[in-house]
Amino acid sequence: MRVGKLGLIIWLAFCAGVAGCVSLPKSYSTKVRPLYPKLGDSVSNFYQTIDTLTPVLRWSDIKSEGQTYDVAVWESPSEAPDESITGTPIKPRKWGKQVYYVQAVSQNYFKISKPLKPKTCYHWSVRLRTGSKTSEWATFSQSAVSPIGIGYAYHLPFGFITPGH
């Protein structure tokens, strides 16, 4: 039995309705992947609450000889992570106020030494540096299908929420 494109779309919509929400796999703008804090699996929980105000950010090591990393952390402009991560290719979200920026990080991790604010959403990203030339900041995108429609998170930085202590 052959199923046409419309039939497949209806079937996917039905399955999404039964399941509540189906998130499609993430796509990344670069080969950098966050290792800690990890991203959540779906659009409803991208940013996980971590257990410290001074995290060690970790990412996949992709640099070549002669390269280093730049690392930046932004405080979200919104107290609610969902508000800070909404955006589309036409209306990008705001990453927030930059609270950390370091260059020439030689390892694939960086410890934030000054405690961050509790119960706050932060964004972070990494880029490659070769001398004075830099790559784009690493981001991810993800789509989801739910009973109320299709959602899309576009070019988001990685993120986390600090604990409430």
Image (cartoon, rainbow, N blue to C red):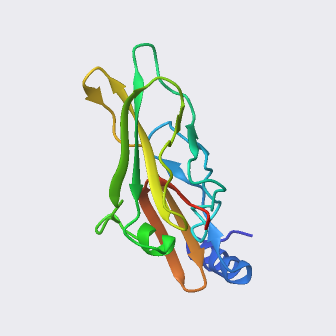
Residue in the picture at 34% in, 40% down? 136
| Total numbered labels | 0
Residue in the picture at 50% in, 70% down? 81
**Residue 130 visible in the displayed image:** yes
**Residue 139 visible in the displayed image:** no
Q: For the C terminus, give its image quadrant.
A: bottom right
For residue 73, above or below residue 1: above
For residue 98, above or below residue 127: below
Residue in the picture at 47% in, 68% down? 152
For residue 118, above or below residue 104: below
Residue in the picture at 33% in, 52% down? 98
Residue at the extreme left of the image, as rendered: 132
Where does the image place residue 39, in percent across and percent down from the top left?
A: 60, 55
Residues 21 and 47: in front is: 47
Where does the image place residue 85, in percent across and percent down from the top left?
A: 44, 67
Where does the image place residue 1, in percent across and percent down from the top left?
A: 75, 70
Residues 9 and 51: in front is: 51
Quadrant of the rendered image containing residue 96: bottom left
Residues 153 and 81: in front is: 81
Residues 163 and 33: in front is: 163
Where does the image place residue 150, in percent across and percent down from the top left?
A: 51, 76
Residue at the extreme top of the image, as rendered: 65
For residue 145, above or below residue 107: below
Residue at the extreme bottom of the image, as rendered: 148
